[in-house]
Image (cartoon, rainbow, N blue to C red):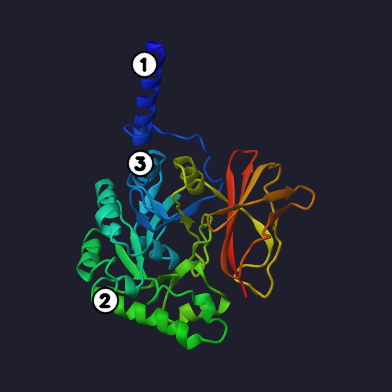
């Protein structure tokens, strides 16, 4: 009996050691890299232990992410290098990663920044004006704290005035959308004395009209939360980002970073489309590499997992969405291929 209790005690201690990550750098996954060169953009919100939200990532897991990137040969780039690449002025390494944060939580400077600084890595923060503590939001970041982030190599970019769902302004309220974008851009440039050239759409919400208005507002690039890797010829106003969630394991993270682009012929609804009905199913027609077999198909709406199947004859993913609501949605499909690669495609649409 004593031996059994002793055995259980050692098992518990070993489990705790693994969970607390005493040697997190030793965790490795044999996941094949993308079969084409890609640029990975990661999207975080709040780095906090025991956070209440599905978008909160623990300090341990965030540190594990950075260790995994280093151990697997990925190179984190800064915002200026990424923008120079988009402008055709600079090349990027084959395994480039841009780290971004949205909103401007206090934990950005208290938790995320020290971990990044320890790894010697830069990041980009998209902050909305109401999250600036000196302006109106007590739980955000002060101007002085934003300047401290800049001194650490961070870039501070736009996220609208009030974290507005810009898709709600389309197609007719151009003035309202421009006010949200331009006022935020001008405020940040005045307070921080640096140019602001990029916007992250709040909620990843946009339409074709919103995209055109963002160009008119003076932005050179716009970031989504549509999942998937970016190729080396990305759409500058539809830059994909991998959202990181509280539920994600380190293996989930590894699959996202190493994923291959899923070639999509057509989706119903289409990307950025506004529809006036609630679909029970969503269709994704794909063009798979020659000889690739689908081992598993996954789909999620924001962070909610959905039922999905793959029709081999039609080369089609069918996603069941019987309870989908009105509003803006980000949907992601993932195929695990016979080559053990994860193929990912994400897009968004609006239901009114």
Q: Where in the figure is residue 312, as x and y percent of width and height?
A: 76, 47
**Of circles 3 and 1, which is in front?**
1
Q: Is residue 323 visible?
A: yes
The 10 Å Cα crowd at callout 2, few under 14, some 14 to 19, many 20 or more, is few
Front-most of 167 and 5? 5
**Circle 3: element type:** helix
Of labels 2 and 3, earlier in sequence is: 3
Q: Nearer the viewer, residue 170 or 186?
A: 170
What SS does tag 1 mark? helix
> Nearer the observer, disc 1 or disc 2?
1
Residue for point 46% across, 42% down: 249
Task: Indicate the secondary structure of the residue bearing disc 2.
Answer: loop
Q: Which sits earlier in the primary sequence, circle 3 or circle 1?
A: 1
Q: Which mark is residue 67?
A: 3
Front-lying residue, 5 or 239? 5
Residue located 50% across and 53% down the image: 38
Q: Which residue is mark 1?
A: 6
Looking at the rendering, which quadrant does residue 7 occupy?
A: top left
Q: How far separated are the C-alphas under marks 3 and 1?
A: 34 Å
Q: Tell me the quarter of the image containing the N terminus.
A: top left
Sequence-wise first label, 1 or 2 = 1
> Distance from label 1 to label 2 (Cα)?
58 Å
């Amino acid at each position: 009996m004593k031996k059994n209790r002793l055995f259980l005690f050692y098992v518990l201690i070993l489990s705790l050691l693994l969970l607390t990550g005493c040697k997190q750098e030793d965790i490795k996954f044999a996941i094949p890299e993308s079969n084409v060169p890609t640029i990975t953009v990661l999207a975080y919100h709040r780095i906090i232990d025991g956070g209440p939200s599905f978008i909160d990532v623990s300090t341990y897991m965030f540190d594990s992410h950075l260790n995994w990137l280093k151990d697997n040969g990925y190179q984190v780039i800064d915002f200026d290098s990424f923008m120079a690449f988009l402008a055709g002025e600079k090349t990027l390494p084959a395994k480039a990663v841009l780290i971004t944060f949205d909103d401007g939580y206090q934990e950005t400077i208290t938790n995320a920044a020290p971990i990044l600084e320890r790894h010697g890595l830069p990041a980009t923060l998209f902050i909305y004006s109401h999250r600036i503590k000196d302006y109106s939001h007590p739980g955000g970041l002060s101007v002085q704290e934003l300047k401290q982030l800049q001194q650490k190599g961070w870039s501070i970019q736009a996220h609208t005035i009030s974290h507005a769902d810009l898709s709600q302004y389309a197609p007719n309220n151009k003035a309202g959308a421009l006010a949200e974008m331009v006022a935020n851009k001008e405020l940040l440039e005045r307070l921080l004395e640096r140019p602001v050239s990029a916007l992250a759409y709040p909620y990843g919400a946009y339409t074709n009209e919103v995209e055109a208005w963002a160009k008119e507002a003076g932005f050179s690039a716009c970031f989504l939360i549509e999942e998937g890797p970016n190729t080396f010829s990305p759409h500058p106003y539809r830059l994909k980002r991998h959202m990181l969630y509280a539920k994600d394991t380190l293996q989930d993270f590894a699959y996202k970073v190493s994923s291959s682009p899923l070639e999509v012929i057509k989706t119903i609804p289409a990307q950025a489309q506004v529809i006036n009905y609630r679909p029970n199913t969503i269709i994704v027609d794909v063009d798979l590499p020659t000889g690739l077999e689908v081992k598993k198909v996954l789909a999620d709406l924001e962070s909610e997992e959905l039922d999905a199947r793959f029709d081999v004859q039609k080369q089609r993913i069918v996603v069941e969405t019987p309870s989908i609501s009105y509003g803006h949605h980000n949907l992601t499909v993932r195929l695990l291929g016979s080559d053990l690669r994860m193929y990912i495609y994400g897009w968004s649409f609006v239901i009114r």
